[in-house]
Amino acid sequence: MKLAAATVYAVDIPFTETFTHSAQVRRACDSVVVRVVNEEGVAGFGEGAPRPYVTGETPDSVLKHLVGDVWPSLAGTELPNPVEDGLAAFDAVIPETTVAGVIAPNAARCALELATLDCALRSTGASVALLIPARRSTLTYGGVITAGDDEAAARRASQMRSVGLDHVKLKVGTGNDVERVRAVREALGPDVSLRLDANGGWDLEQALTVLNAVAPFGIDVVEQPLPRHALADLKALRQECAVPVMADESLVTLEDAEMLLSAEAVDMFNIRVSKCGGLFRSTEMVRLAAQAGVGVQVGSQVGETAILSAAGRHLAAWAPELAFVEGSYGTLLLAEDVSVEPVRFGHRGRASVLTGPGLGIEVVEERLRRYAKRVVELLAEKTRP
């Protein structure tokens, strides 16, 4: 099964509401979706969600990298056999590359890995679950409260409690954090799990001040309290604060994972498929965490479509130990999603595992074209913009 063609879509799907945190204000999905086709005409889809404040990538840089650097090496390549070669082969087929100013071109790698994996599995009628078998039949997703005033945060917390969500994450790091956490905890009541996410918005002194003040409110974990490169401060925070610490923006590559574990700097990993470079590298991070006794959250990129949501669900269903799972917002956040079937969590955050061929969803290409800011068609012999 050789790769015969690909199409790259830079999509812009509006959100139903603005999503804000300390590092970004987002009003639309800006993913890059890749569709690959093999010589038999079977198509597969993958998605990357570039975030300049996470990996250094932008939609434009991902598109340029895929078209100019990666596709010329992949065009006409024989795809691995998923049954015989396993998940690692789909990571290995994508060339190792670097991009100036980018920590790692992981959104680009993820989009291609998922697309080729989806294509190869569909050719055999098999599911991703063949390679990473589900350890649980259902998952429970949580909600996220974006940055904003305390009153609005408390209202959203009350709504989440009323629909039965058991886990809630609150964005912090934008000022007045203690009163904001207090208001949300009061609205949620004592039984709902509450996590904080600063998106690297504090320094060590600020983090210690806020976290020691809010610890009595029952905080399960704080996500990325400090900037990416503050490894020594992250370790000091973990040692001096009662709230457990989770790495997110500090965890982009496998080398990052090894450094964090070696330094004993965190209690948990937030593993997001696009950020971490695809399913294979995400599973490797899960394994490293398990060996070190570090907890795992399978996270998501805000605004991801059903493609990345499906990949994240397979990862979460497989993970040996799973503390929290995020994503699968679908049309709760997107004006329209790209799959036939909804990949959105239901009542109380519950969602079933996916069992269909490939990633387990049917992508509607017409929707990709409708929301595309740019489309590039690629053939095995040449590139046609």
Image: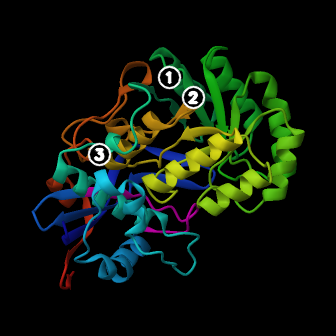
In this view, the residue in front, 73 or 58, is 73
Q: Which residues are magenta?
A: 45-58
Determine whether 236 is above or below 258 in the image.
above
Tell me what residue is drawn at x 10 percent, y 63 percent: 40
Return the x and y of residue 42 as percentages of the image width and height.
14, 58
- Disc 3 marks a residue whose amino acid type is Leu
Q: Amino acid at mark 1?
A: Met
Q: Which mark is residue 160?
A: 1
- The answer to whether residue 303 is above or below residue 115 is above
Residue 273 x/y as whole percent: 46, 51
In the image, residue 334 sits, relative to residue 373, either above or below, namely: above
* Most common SS among magenta residues: loop
**Which one is earlier in the sequence, the residue at label 2 or at label 3?**
2
The local secondary structure at tag 2 comes to strand
Q: Residue furthest front?
A: 84
Tell me, yes or no, whether the two marked residues, 2 and 3, touch with CB atoms within 8 Å: no
In the rendered structure, the answer to whether residue 132 lies left or right of residue 252 reads left
The label number, if any, that marks residue 359 in the structure image: 3
- Tell me the crowding category of disc 3: few under 14, some 14 to 19, or many 20 or more residues within 10 angstroms, Cα based: many
- In the rendered image, which residue does mark 2 sit on? 168
Horizontal side of 342 relative to 138 (left or right) equals left
> How far is disc 2 from disc 1 in space, using C-alphas?
8 Å
Colour pattern of the rendering: rainbow
Quadrant position of residue 312: top left
Q: Hey, which quadrant is residue 187 in on the image?
A: top right
Q: Which is more foreground, mark 2 or mark 3?
A: 3
Which amino acid does the dot numbered 2 rest on? Val
Toward the viewer: 104 or 183? Answer: 104
Q: CA distance from mark 2 to mark 3?
A: 27 Å
- In x, y percent, where is residue 299? 52, 43
